[in-house]
Image (tube, rainbow, N blue to C red):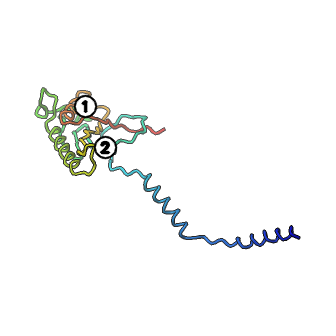
Amino acid sequence: MAFHKSIRNRRVRRTIHKEFDLQLTSMMDILVIILVFLLKSYSASTNSFSSVPGIKLPISKSQDIPYDSLHLIVTPEAITFEGNRVVEFAQTADTLNGGQPSYAFKPEDLDEGNMRIPRLFNSLTEARKKAEILRAKSPARDAKGNPLPFDGVLAIQADKRVKYDTLRKIMYTAGSADFRVFRLLAMRLDP
């Protein structure tokens, strides 16, 4: 008889727990946790490195995403820094007729033994000064409490037909303006 009682009790227990109410507060907690996870894992980037019409970028297999940095574009017509056209290249008759771009500088666009580009140097120096002012006002500090130093990163987006000499002059000019890290952008080769 005791055996029959326990079976009856189990049946009663099952009928008691058959009604299950969904608690709204628990579901809200789960949704908030998922939302916080998605917001933390979302990477917001302010850089917008897009391909410029008229240039052919080299191709790379690297899957790295470029860091936020100042952006310099070298097209067959000109050098553009942060959306402002800084220096225009000298156009030859062959270039104007659809030939290979020359990427030649005008004589008045160079100084220091034809190595530095003064207008590009002035633009880069101005951008560096603005960055240093912003870092001085930023709450981010190093271990000693000083503002973080200028990182000097410059992203260069150049046509694959750019001559080495032209790229060397651009990098020399950027180096003299305290830009020490160059990121040469390329098109990603999708697998």
Image spot of residue 29 (x, y percent)? 51, 64
Residue 33 lies, with reference to residue 7, above or below; the image says above
Residue 113 is marked as none
Name the residue that disc number 1 marks. Answer: 167
Dividing the picture into quarters, in which one does residue 77 lie? top left
Residue 106 in picture, x, y percent from top left:
14, 33
Q: Residue at x 43, y 37 (%)?
A: 189
**Disc 2 residue type?**
Pro
CA gap between label 2 and label 1 equals 19 Å
Which residue is situated farthest in the front direction here? 2
Quarter where residue 1 is shown:
bottom right
Q: Amino acid at mark 1?
A: Leu
Q: Foreground: 189 or 38?
A: 38
Camera-nearest label, 2 or 1: 1
Mark 1 residue element: helix
Mark 2 and mark 1 lie on one chain; the one further toward the N terminus is 2
Q: Nearer the viewer, residue 89 or 175?
A: 175
Q: Label 2, on which residue?
A: 53
Q: Dot 2: few (<14), some (14–19), or many (≥20) neighbours within 10 Å?
A: few
Residue 36: x and y in percent read: 45, 58
Query: Which element type, helix, strand or loop, lies under badge 2?
Result: loop
Nearest the viewer among 39 and 187 is: 39
Q: Residue at x 21, y 48 (%)?
A: 136
Classify 66 as above or below 99.
below
**In the image, 44: left or right of 5?**
left
